[in-house]
Amino acid sequence: MDMNIISKKKPFYPINESLKEYLFNYSRLVKIPFTYSELLRYFFSIPQKDKHGKDTLWQTVMFQPSEMEDIHHRLVKMYAMMKFDGNESLMEHLLVDRVDFCAFGNSKPFRICIVNQYNDNHDYYYVKIADASRVYGLEFEDLLSPNRINFLVDQDTLVEEHIVGIPGDMFMKPEYKWIEVNEVRMAKEFVKFNERCFVRLLGDMRAYNFVIDVTADFDDVQYRFRAIDFDQQCYEGKKTVYLPQYFKENKHFVDLCIKQLNEETMQQYQQEERTLIAKRIKRSRNRTNLLLDAMSNDTLSIPVKEDNLKKELAKHYAHPQFLKCKNMGEIMRVSLDLLIDKN
């Protein structure tokens, strides 16, 4: 796959009034006790290294002593809002362990580490610029995938919960060799993840943009591939960008599929996933339609990308309705309507 088809710098798209109304109606739009820009006012940073001394691309940031206590209090308050509806009586034993910043990629996130003083348990959440593409991606993940995800928005600030799992690009490294991999189950879940991304048009799912959640079952181990970066929701114009199988970073998982699965089995798993997505849409039909209404009145890409994508999807599905679409929201609606019609 020619990686030049991925835009090096996707523009930020503001959250329009229709999307704000949707977020408010479903308790996603709240008053956040700080802003993304406030966190940018740190005065010192220390690069983070892994245990092998390699740069992690994250740096721990520090604020002025005169501001630190207030900022940390508001960061803990935000955690309380996400986890237990802002009950401040449950905040007293929580502290900010550290604040990390990553300048890599479009989102430039802050990672907030919260520690429980009683048992030293750590948890995380992320603060990013509120880009409309990312918000649509998060909401579709919550509606159409088997995963629930918690996020909140206020003006230009987006707060996301931490998604637990082993990063895809790290999964096969020596430090994770203690995990005995069931290759058939791993291959099955990659096929289902690949199909899920394509149906809901989530792009750029290279190995470092998803994690693998490993769960012990009574007779073996189960896996689930989970997206962690939603920046490329309905932006690129090539259908292959929405298929993780085409990225060289995912070669290990593709090779597993080739080794362990035949064509008939792959088709079975693809249909399984499409059927499950169709059922999820039907269970939340009104909410999904409201989100698609907001998306159809929004700008999430540029005309040349939209035109190319609808042509490629019309050919792929042999469904000319795609050619009538005026924007990415309408393309997404046709993709999901087609899924329901066939299920």
Image (cartoon, rainbow, N blue to C red):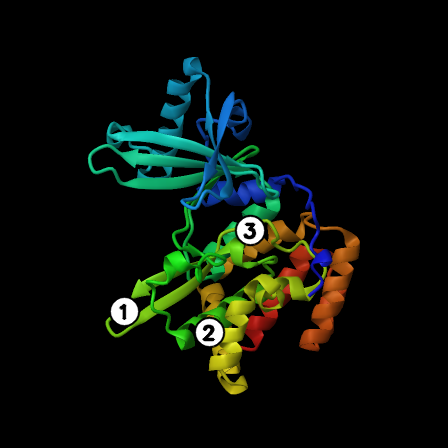
The residue pinned by badge 1 equals 217
The residue that appears at 61% across and 49% down in the rendered structure is 294
- Rendered-image quadrant of the N terminus: bottom right
Residue 230 is marked as: 3
Q: In which quarter of the view is residue 247 placed?
A: bottom right
* Viewer-side residue, 299 vs 201: 201
Distance between the alpha carbons at the discs numbered 2 and 1:
17 Å
The residue pinned by badge 2 equals 187
* Viewer-side residue, 46 vs 240: 46
The residue that appears at 25% across and 37% down in the rendered structure is 120
Residue extending furthest toward the front? 52
Q: Amino acid at mark 2?
A: Ala
Q: Amino acid at mark 3?
A: Phe
Distance between the alpha carbons at the discs numbered 3 and 2:
23 Å
Q: In which quarter of the view is residue 222 placed?
A: bottom left
Left or right side of 313 for 153: left
Callout 3: SS = loop
The picture places residue 130, in percent across and down from the top left corner, at 56, 38
Tag nearer the camera, 1 or 3: 1
Left or right side of 138 for 322: right
Residue 336 is marked as: none
Q: Which of pointers 1 and 3 lies earlier in the amino acid sequence?
A: 1
Left or right side of 297 for 96: left
Is 17 located above or below residue 183 in the figure? above
